[in-house]
Image: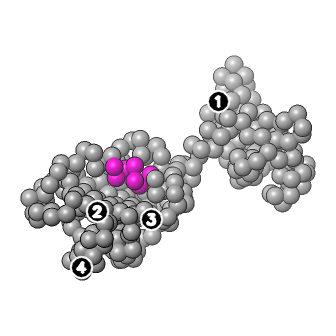
């Protein structure tokens, strides 16, 4: 067993007993620095020499060397024969997993009151893919955004909600559908009996027992609004056109679509 003593900003955090120098406590401690995280992000894009890293982070060469040494000791980066530093495969994995922590931490007030656990665990594990999405707490703004998204859709418009497309959108949507817009709607299974007979093959409706969140997805953008803790519907949520976020929303919608009961 290796006994080490760690210091941060002049304060001792006490003695730690670790099985080796790369235990969970050690990793989290090394990540508890914006400078070291910034270095990892820079090296994720390209290999860099120490002086270039110092310039990009606006720190002294001595400070850059100190941070690189810590990252090297944690096996997150590795010095290359030509003198540059590169992020290791392990470092890439750690940085990728950190994105979910960053999303949760950045929006902790939202996640304190909204129930992300209603969606499958495999999608909670991909929460970092929401990093480029915008959180909007204004419910009416999100409702208006959803209507605009459907109106501006050209290829497809998918929705998961407790209800049908608002009446005011029907004339516009009918024109879009006539031009070939593909529409998929997921509603509560209990409401399937209220769905009128569909007269066009490019409009489909399916039902699931529980609506975990409000979704609107087109080929251009997506919006996702989680329910309040306790189950009440809310229209505060995430939106954006970032490809990674859009793929996350599409994958989650299709997960429920495959499980849905046909109208």
Residue corresponding to mark 4: 171
- The magenta stretch spans which residues? 248-254
- Label 1: state its secondary structure: loop
Along the line of sight, which residue is nearer the eye, 82 or 7?
A: 82
Please give left or right for residue 11 compared with residue 62 in the image: left
User: Depth-wise, is mark 1 or mark 4 nearer the camera?
Assistant: 4
In reply to whether residue 35 is colored magenta, the answer given is no
The residue under the point 13% across, 59% down is: 191
Dot placed on the residue nearer the N-terminal end, 3 or 2: 2
- Residue 10, percent across and down? 79, 48
Residue corresponding to mark 1: 23
User: Depth-wise, is mark 2 or mark 1 nearer the camera?
Assistant: 2
Q: How far apart, in angstroms, are the residues tagged by discs 2 and 1?
A: 50 Å
Task: Name the main secondary structure of what is drawn in magenta.
Answer: helix
- Residue 54, percent across and down? 86, 54
Dot placed on the residue nearer the N-terminal end, 2 or 1: 1
Dot placed on the residue nearer the N-terminal end, 3 or 4: 4
Dot placed on the residue nearer the N-terminal end, 1 or 3: 1
For the residues bearing labels 3 and 2, Cβ distance under 8 angstroms: no
Reply above or below: 136 against 38.
below
Q: Which mark is residue 183?
A: 2
Residue 77 position by quadrant: top right
User: Depth-wise, is mark 1 or mark 3 nearer the camera?
Assistant: 3
Q: How far apart, in angstroms, are the residues tagged by discs 1 and 3?
A: 40 Å
Q: Which mark is residue 221?
A: 3
């Amino acid at each position: 067993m290796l006994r080490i003593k760690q210091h941060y900003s002049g304060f001792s955090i006490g003695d730690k007993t670790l099985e080796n120098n790369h235990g969970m406590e050690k990793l989290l401690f090394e990540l508890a620095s914006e400078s070291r995280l910034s270095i990892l992000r820079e090296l994720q894009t390209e290999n860099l020499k120490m002086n270039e890293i110092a310039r990009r982070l606006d720190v002294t060469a001595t400070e850059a060397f100190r941070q690189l040494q810590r990252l090297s000791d944690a096996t997150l980066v590795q010095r290359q024969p030509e003198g540059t530093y590169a992020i290791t495969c392990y470092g890439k994995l750690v940085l990728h997993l950190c994105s979910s922590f960053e999303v949760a931490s950045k929006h902790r007030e939202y996640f304190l009151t909204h129930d992300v656990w209603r969606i499958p665990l495999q999608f909670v594990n991909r929460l970092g893919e929401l990093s480029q999405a915008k959180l909007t707490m204004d419910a009416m703004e999100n409702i208006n955004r959803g209507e605009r998204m459907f109106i501006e859709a050209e290829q497809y418009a998918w929705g998961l909600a407790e209800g049908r497309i608002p009446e005011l959108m029907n004339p516009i949507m009918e024109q879009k559908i006539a031009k070939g817009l593909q529409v998929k709607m997921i509603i509560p299974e209990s409401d399937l009996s209220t769905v009128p007979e569909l007269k066009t093959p490019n409009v489909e409706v399916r039902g699931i027992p529980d609506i975990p969140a409000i979704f609107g997805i087109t080929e251009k953008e997506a919006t996702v609004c989680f329910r309040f803790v306790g189950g009440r519907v809310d229209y505060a949520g995430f939106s954006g056109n970032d490809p990674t976020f859009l793929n996350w929303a599409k994958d989650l919608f299709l997960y429920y679509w495959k499980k849905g009961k046909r109208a």
